[in-house]
């Protein structure tokens, strides 16, 4: 569990640098990686930090996530890392540190109405969208985005009203 991210990124770097290829690396459970890191650091008698994780967790995760790069020669490495929430706790050390290191996250949750996993736009995050929205995308993108978010929020609010036995208005 500890070596897999480095092995995957070493292979990705080989193809990106030597063959100028665009490489996508999917790291499918960084929580499992962090748990293994915690076991090793505990066996080394290191003092644990938050959630029994090693004090070096931020640096260890950053070392992996910061290997995402675009090389001048044309090759690139894109990383999609999956973090499982421990008991649904977004403040757990792994998702919390991941949020500080990365430029954005897609928060997935199971929608009980349709029984599928969906992207939750209110808990997802992008620190880069303001750099491109309306500048490198369509000019009306900010207005469309804001309207879509507002409608989604209104629909979620109407669903909550209905679940709590309130009458819905024509707008709802």
Image (cartoon, rainbow, N blue to C red):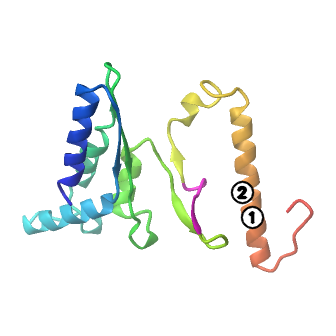
Report whether 24 appears left or right of 172.
left
Which picture quadrant has residue 23?
top left
Closest to the observer, 45 or 21: 21
Q: Image height check: is 19 above or below 142? A: above
Residue name at image x 13 percent, y 64 percent: 40
Measured as percent of width and height from the top left, residue 86 is found at 38, 70
Report whether 151 appears left or right of 170.
left
Q: Which residue was labeled with disc 2?
A: 153
Which picture quadrant has residue 35?
bottom left
Measured as percent of width and height from the top left, residue 20 is found at 30, 25
Answer whether residue 42 is magenta in the image.
no
Measured as percent of width and height from the top left, residue 169 is found at 90, 66
Q: Image height check: is 70 above or below 24? A: above
Residue name at image x 55 percent, y 29 percent: 131
Closest to the observer, 16 or 137: 16
Closest to the observer, 11 or 60: 11
Q: In which quadrant will I find the N terminus?
A: bottom left
Specify start and end residues of the magenta stretch as a single range: 116-123
Measured as percent of width and height from the top left, residue 114 is found at 65, 70
Proximity of marks 2 and 1: CB atoms separated by less than 8 Å: yes
Which residue reaches farthest front? 19
Q: Dot 1: what SS?
A: helix
How many tags in the picture?
A: 2
Q: Which mark is residue 50?
A: none
Q: Image height check: is 164 above or below 110? A: below
Which residue reaches farthest right? 170
Answer whether residue 121 is magenta in the image.
yes
Q: In which quadrant will I find the C terminus?
A: bottom right
Give the class, few, some or many, for how many residues have Cα within 10 Å of label 2's Cα (few <14, many ≥20): some
Give the class, few, some or many, for how many residues have Cα within 10 Å of label 1's Cα (few <14, many ≥20): few
Report whether 139 appears left or right of 53.
right
């Amino acid at each position: 569990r500890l070596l897999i991210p480095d092995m995957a990124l070493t292979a990705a770097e080989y193809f990106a640098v030597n063959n100028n290829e665009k490489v996508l690396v999917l790291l499918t459970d960084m929580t499992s990686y962090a748990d293994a890191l915690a076991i090793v650091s505990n066996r080394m008698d290191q003092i644990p930090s938050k959630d029994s994780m090693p004090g070096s967790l931020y640096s260890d995760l950053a070392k992996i996530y910061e290997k995402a790069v675009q090389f001048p020669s044309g090759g690139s490495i894109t990383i999609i890392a999956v973090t499982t929430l421990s008991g649904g706790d977004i403040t757990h050390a792994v998702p919390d540190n991941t949020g500080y290191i990365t430029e954005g996250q897609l928060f997935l949750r199971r929608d009980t109405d349709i029984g599928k996993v969906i992207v939750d736009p209110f808990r997802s995050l992008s620190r880069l969208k303001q750099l491109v929205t309306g500048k490198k995308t369509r000019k009306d993108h900010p207005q469309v985005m804001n309207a879509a978010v507002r409608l989604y929020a209104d629909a979620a609010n109407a669903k909550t009203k209905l679940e709590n036995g309130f009458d819905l208005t024509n707008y709802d």
